[in-house]
Amino acid sequence: MSSFHFTIDAECPDSWARAGTISTPHGTILTPIFMPVGTQATVKSVSPEELRAAGAQIILANTYHLMLRPGSSLVAEFGGLHSFMHWDGPILTDSGGFQVWSLGHLRKLNEDGVTFKSHLDGSYHILTPERVMEIEAELGSDIILPLDICAPYPCSPLEARKAMENTHRWEERALIAKERHRPEQTLFGIVQGAFEPELRRESARVIGNMPFPGLSIGGLSVGEPKAQMWEMLRHVTPELPRDKPRHLLGVGSPEDMVMGVGLGMDMFDCVLPTRVARHGGLFTATGRVNIKSSRFRTVRGPIEEGCDCYTCRNYSAGYVHHLIRAEEQLYYRLGTIHNVHFMLRLAAQLRAAIQAGTYTQFRDEFLARYVPASEQVREQQREKWKAARERQADVR
């Protein structure tokens, strides 16, 4: 029997923001929360102890990647992900659905599931809703997601409906298959519908009425303008059950989390904070800075005044600048710690504002001073990372 439980601790009457508590077999999660992404059973360059010190309560791991390497059966031999990666807190594993979308040139979809070519060695694999439940049972994570289809952006209404209805059928099969495995695991449903308001509302109602203890919102942040993402959430949230936690899949820039909380979301995950850190992008209260910039060369103070992360408490911005310019490995650890801590501190600040009834004031003040990356920069980065991924696949 699952020990999963969700309670709402506070709500803001002038928005959909709420603070909650989630109980899992491996600990309690206070929401809103950001989940650092440990794609291959590790958050790149930092240890579980450093994640805990930065404030992490739950991390996300990737079913697709762990199935390919080292293999879920091997992870099971080690006692599951928690013991394998030395993390004693809650873990959420996604389903591989996003990879179905992002590795589209390597896969084929049909009613039964997806056949894809490994980006590692070119071998062929089949994922079905039932197989995903089996893999995630072997991984032993606390919260698991079913196989879904993330429609591309842009796509036609017909294509969006087909992907949504297929996802709904797969989720029904996942519910049945899950009963054959670990009862202590909690299966979240995934809402799809691409960028069609009617479909988004329909999917929210259909999945919300299924016996899922929690819900993930998928298919957003896939190349669309941010305003369009927020518009979709405005259609989705009123249709969702109030008493189930809501996870916004793959969304996790600072401004996205602040806005998403006001639109009723409780949980966030994204590779962005750790990825941009590795390339020199570090978060501050006024926006992202490039620590490679020569203006940091002689800065004796921290990356951000008032930041209490390990990096800012112990190292100058000038030293961190030197590390990345010299391509020293220590930089990746220090930069990642800073960004992860920033996101988790922001989540805690949002929770405190909700409990105090001042969320909208906090949101407005944050967005007034925080300058996000431009849409053009975001698109350039996305295309660069997409091209690098496809080049990697092509050489296999």
Image: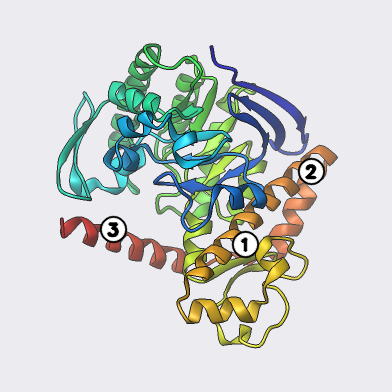
Rendered residue at 53%/77% (across/down): 323
- The residue that label 2 is drawn on is 352
Q: Nearer the viewer, residue 345 or 208?
A: 345
Crowding around mark 1 (Cα neighbors within 10 Å: few <14, some 14 to 19, many 20+) is many
- The residue that label 1 is drawn on is 338
**Quadrant in the picture for residue 357:** top right
Q: Earlier in the sequence, mark 1 or mark 2?
A: 1
* Three-letter code for the amino acid on which mark 3 is drawn: Arg
Circle count: 3
Callout 1: SS: helix
- The residue that label 3 is drawn on is 389
Asked if marks 3 and 2 touch (Cβ < 8 Å), the reply is no
Rendered residue at 30%/41% (across/down): 70
Could you tell me how far apart the alpha carbons at marks 1 and 3 are, in whole angstroms?
26 Å
Residue 176 x %, y %: 36, 12
Residue 23 x %, y %: 64, 25
Residue 60 x %, y %: 49, 41
Q: Nearer the viewer, residue 91 or 105?
A: 91
Rendered residue at 56%/33% (across/down): 90
* Three-letter code for the amino acid on which mark 2 is drawn: Ala
Callout 3: SS: helix
Q: Which is closer to the viewer, label 1 or label 3?
A: 1
